[in-house]
Amino acid sequence: MDQPLVSVRDLKIGAKTDSGREVEIIKGVSFDIAPGEIVALIGESGSGKTTIALSLMGHARPGCAIHGGTIRVGRHEVTAMSERQRAAMRGTELSYVPQSAAAAFNPAKRIMDQVVEITAIHKLMPREQAEAKARALFRALALPDPDTIGHRYPHQVSGGQLQRLSAAMALIGDPALVIFDEPTTALDVTTQIEVLRAFRSVMDKGAMAGVYVSHDLAVVAQIADRIVVLKNGMVQEEGATEQILHAPKHPYTRQLLDAFEPVPHVPLDRPQAPEPILTVQDLCAGYGVMRDGVPAAKILHDVSFRLERGRNLGVIGESGSGKSTLARAIAGILPAYRGNLLLDGKELAPLLQQRSKDELRRVQIVFQLADTALNPAQSIETILARPLAFYHGMTGAARKARVIELLDMVRLPGHLRHRLPSELSGGQKQRVNLARALAAEPELILCDEITSALDTVVAAAILDLLKELQRDLNLSYMFISHDLSTVEAICDEVLVMLKGRVVEALPAARMSTDAAHPYSRLLIGSIPQLDTGWLKGLEQDPALIAQFAGR
Amino acid sequence: MSLALRLPTPARLGYSFNWAGRIGLAVILFWAAIAIIGPWIAPYPPGDMVDFDYFGPMSSQFWMGSDYLGRDILSRIIMGTRYTTGIALAAVILACAGGVLLGMIAAVVGGWFDTLLSRFLDAFNGIPHLLFGLVVVAAVGSSIPILIVTLAAMYLPGSYRFARALAVNVNTMDFVTVARARGEGFGHIILREIFPNILGPVLADLGLRFVFIVLVLSGLSFLGLGVQPPNADWGALVRENIEGLSLGAPAVIFPSIAIASLTISVNMFIDNLPTRIRDRSE
């Protein structure tokens, strides 16, 4: 087998922007995939990795078009085919596993009907045979109740299961090439492991080739044979996984790897203030209709912790563990129905409206998605000027000078203040988001997953900025994240949360060694490592997973 | 680069229209100008019988013919412009201002206030518009202020529903939560955080509602409940001269064309608003 299964030569893809300008998205990319080989396309958002993956199917997203180069998959010259011929090829020669399985399944149809759809479209086999094959795939993908899970509707299975079901959908036509588009990005770490394991085992058995699109080097290290590093629509480096991880040649690859390496956080040496900045005692909060002073859906149960002034507290846990609810309860957006909040030793009212302006000023909250956290109709200057006017009564030239100063604090040029949020990049928006919190001159900033939506390199820069600001302004952070390496990089203490309770409090530096609670150990052990053998060598107690992951 | 010498034309500021929008705007501006300068350009006093014939044809003397009493139709349309556009504009501004304000308040306050107000306005919306107009005008009598208030009341619930649906979505965005956590008052949240983000669709809705109001006003006038003789808006002109239809008189055609041209051009204009205004929130 000397001929590669897929060969892409000098691929160019362009798009037309709203203002009618032509932009090149992919600027001459070439690579090969051998039969049975899994190649990862890795890069930050906007690097063109998904665009390339979709072009293998001859598909370009609306507004984009393939401008040049050739793509060959098996015997087919994809770039020379008509749309009808391409449609005949999709599903049988190659297939696609999307990022969000929840959005890829039709919620109104049973799972089995959707999984076997490819066999019906291409008239591959009778329905009974297709269903039997689907059940075999469910078994191979380690899905629970493989014989009956097909009768359920998409909302009746968990996110990780749905992602594996969408893989079954892609595999049923026995394609020679499967394209995985960030299939585990939206999943929790413990779920991600199961899905990766399932993918790995079917791919090994079936001798299928794969393209795995991801931004996460550690995930890719577990599954890919070869890695193609992309940036701005160009190949930066291409090589075997081991080589990329251990002997990267290109500076950009090295930058990606460096961003992955957690820089251990060194706590600041300051004389300890007598009172902790925040004390939380037996906090309970929830949503829904209040009855007898207790809400219908209780989320937080008796959460207690202390945060010393100038220190950082990390809160980790999977989705649904109540991390964000905790931040909202502290900020007063969701009033706690029981328990106490003490800010600098003084009682803080649970309800926002009962707090004084000064109390509100001292605690600021920063949200995950800068896209929705900044008013799209206001300029950056208006956004930053508002807290200055509101808390400090600043006007005119003094306020303008302070806005420029704040932008400078978050390392943004002052002339950006005339722009609208939509005219900034993701990292810039997050910096403005942070600058707005700084404008209040707070003592405590609640950071709710503020780096989760950002690319690795950008997120690392934001973390550096946070540390620098802490040094200069004596801030304290409560840092909520599902990403343990981020927490390790910035926090002194870590709270592990599970179903609204704090299961363990640990010093961040010794998180992996000191964890005593089985759930903390499971969570910390599930973080993918930059090591190709990590997934294979990972031993986890299935009973433990079943108990804590809620499946 | 002659950057400093560039004039800030709409196109350079990002407010450019396409052709359909420009034609729409031109017709709207034409009728607005007629409404303002009408009394000075009308060739005859609108109430005077100037033609010896009734339902007279188009001639160099009477450009659009004459009506059932021999009055000049051109002069009467020019006079009617003031009533039609004035009443419709006043009513649509009242309806949208009230609806949008109530809608935003309901979305932000939520709870029983929202439920109560929404159900009340839904029930109110259940009454057919024309029927409601008929009953009110028949009960209170027809005068211009009453017409304006009645038309505004008819179209307020729809505007409320529309604005509330938009505001509910904006209200859950993080930037509104941030403003609330900052301790901002009710007024700031509604006017500064929410209103700019629903403005585009609300403007489009305002245009659409204006068209509906012009049509309902014409309908009311056609039934004899709108502007009272000897004054007349365009709908009343159609009604007055409806018998002329069988005689092929231009007296009934031209007011109809006026109604059509205004409503269609308003639609064309709002459908082709510059994207900068229409999609502000994107």
Image (spheres, coloured by chain):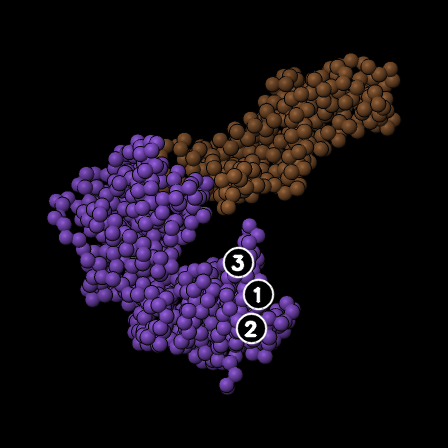
- The purple one among the chains is A
Task: Say which residue appears at 21% left-offset and 38% top-offset.
Answer: A347
Element type at mark 3: strand
**Which label sits on residue A66?**
1
| Residue B236 in the figure: left or right of residue B203 | right
Parent chain of label 3? A
Residue kind at label 2, given as amino acid type:
Ile
Mark 2 lies on residue: A71
Residue kind at label 1, given as amino acid type:
Ile
Q: Position of residue A248 (x, y in %)?
A: 34, 73
Mark 3 lies on residue: A23
- Camera-side mark, 1 or 3: 3
Spatial separation of the CA atoms under disc 2 and disc 3: 21 Å
Depicted B139 relative to depicted A518: above or below = above
Task: Say which residue appears at 35% left-offset and 40% top-offset.
Answer: A384
Depicted A107 relative to depicted A87: above or below = above
- Camera-side mark, 2 or 3: 3
